Image: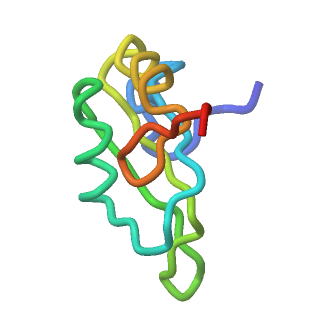
Amino acid sequence: MAPPRGDFNEQDRPARGTEVFVGGLPRSATEATLREVFSSCGEIVDLRIMKDHNGNSKGYGFVRYAKREYANIAKRQKNGIENGVQKNSRN
């Protein structure tokens, strides 16, 4: 195993299972929009939208929750939504 580097503290590492991948974001989505949609699932400790070298959204991001339970709720409740609205598979 490699020796620890720099000031990294094991406590700084997020707990396993607390981060949720969010794909298919419109290029216009902001972190505020992401927070608005996903905050109903539980306490968010971090979120980010991935951007290219020009600062443009790549169309995906991550939401990290305080507890694994909240991430699991988000995965169940938010899977398949578009623009904050659940898609109906019977259309």
Q: Position of residue 73 (x, y in %)?
A: 40, 17
The quarter holding residue 30 reads: bottom left
* Figure label count: 0
> Furthest-front residue in view?
91
Q: Position of residue 67 (x, y in %)?
A: 34, 16
Residue at screen point 48% across, 82% down: 55
Residue at screen point 60% across, 40% down: 91
Of the pair 82 and 18, the residue shown nearer to us: 82
Residue at screen point 34% across, 28% down: 65
Q: Quadrant of the N terminus?
A: top right
Residue at screen point 39% across, 66% down: 29
What colour-coding does the image apply? rainbow
Of the pair 88 and 23, the residue shown nearer to us: 88
Q: Position of residue 17 (x, y in %)?
A: 52, 19
Q: Position of residue 70 (x, y in %)?
A: 35, 18
Q: Is residue 63 above or below residue 13?
A: below
Q: Is residue 32 above or below residue 14?
A: below
Whether residue 1 sits left or right of residue 76 in the image: it is: right
> Furthest-top residue in view?
69
Q: Is residue 27 above or below residue 81?
A: below
